[in-house]
Image: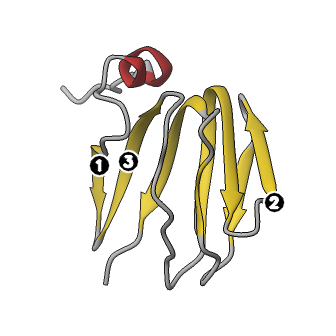
Amino acid sequence: MLEFILHALPAQGRRQVPDTDHVLAQINASQLLLINLVPGEYAFEVHPRAEYLLCLTGTLVLEDEHGRQAAAREGEMVEIPPGLRHRFAPTADAVIVTVAQGG
């Protein structure tokens, strides 16, 4: 018999190694990722497609190469336009979900 599977993502996320992508599901060429962010230094990155980061718990803080910041709290999502050079700010302390787009 098939049954629903419940994932307690905030708790599961905090058990993950910080800043390591944990694949929750493969969706065609993309992956649904769970990431545990803790305060620290993060490298800048840029993507050819829009990126969507959903904050499950804590505070997600992003900054661009000009020092502008965006913050999301539990239940909020940040959209990063394609080509925007960005990183997790040193104060980021959150569990997030994102889709890594492939293909």
In space, the residues marked 2 and 3 are separated at their CA atoms by 25 Å
Give the residue at mark 3: 33
Dot placed on the residue nearer the N-terminal end, 2 or 3: 3
**Kind of residue at badge 2:** Arg
Closer to viewer: mark 1 or mark 2:
2
Upstream in sequence: badge 3 or badge 1: 1
Q: Callout 1: 10 Å neighbours few (<14), some, many (20+)?
A: few
Q: Residue at x 40, y 39 (%)?
A: 34
Where 97 sits versus 66, above or below? above
Tell me the tag on residue 25: 1
Amino acid carrying mark 3 in the image: Leu
Q: Amino acid at mark 1?
A: Ala
Q: Extreme left residue here?
A: 1
Q: How is the image coloured?
A: secondary structure
Q: Nearer the viewer, residue 47 or 50?
A: 47
Q: Which residue is mark 2?
A: 68
Q: In the image, residue 32 lies at what x, y percent?
A: 38, 52
Foreground of the two, 76 or 25: 76
Q: Residues within 10 Å of mark 2 (few under 14, many from 20)?
A: few
Q: Earlier in the sequence, mark 1 or mark 2?
A: 1
As helix, strand or loop, the secondary structure at mark 1 comes to: strand
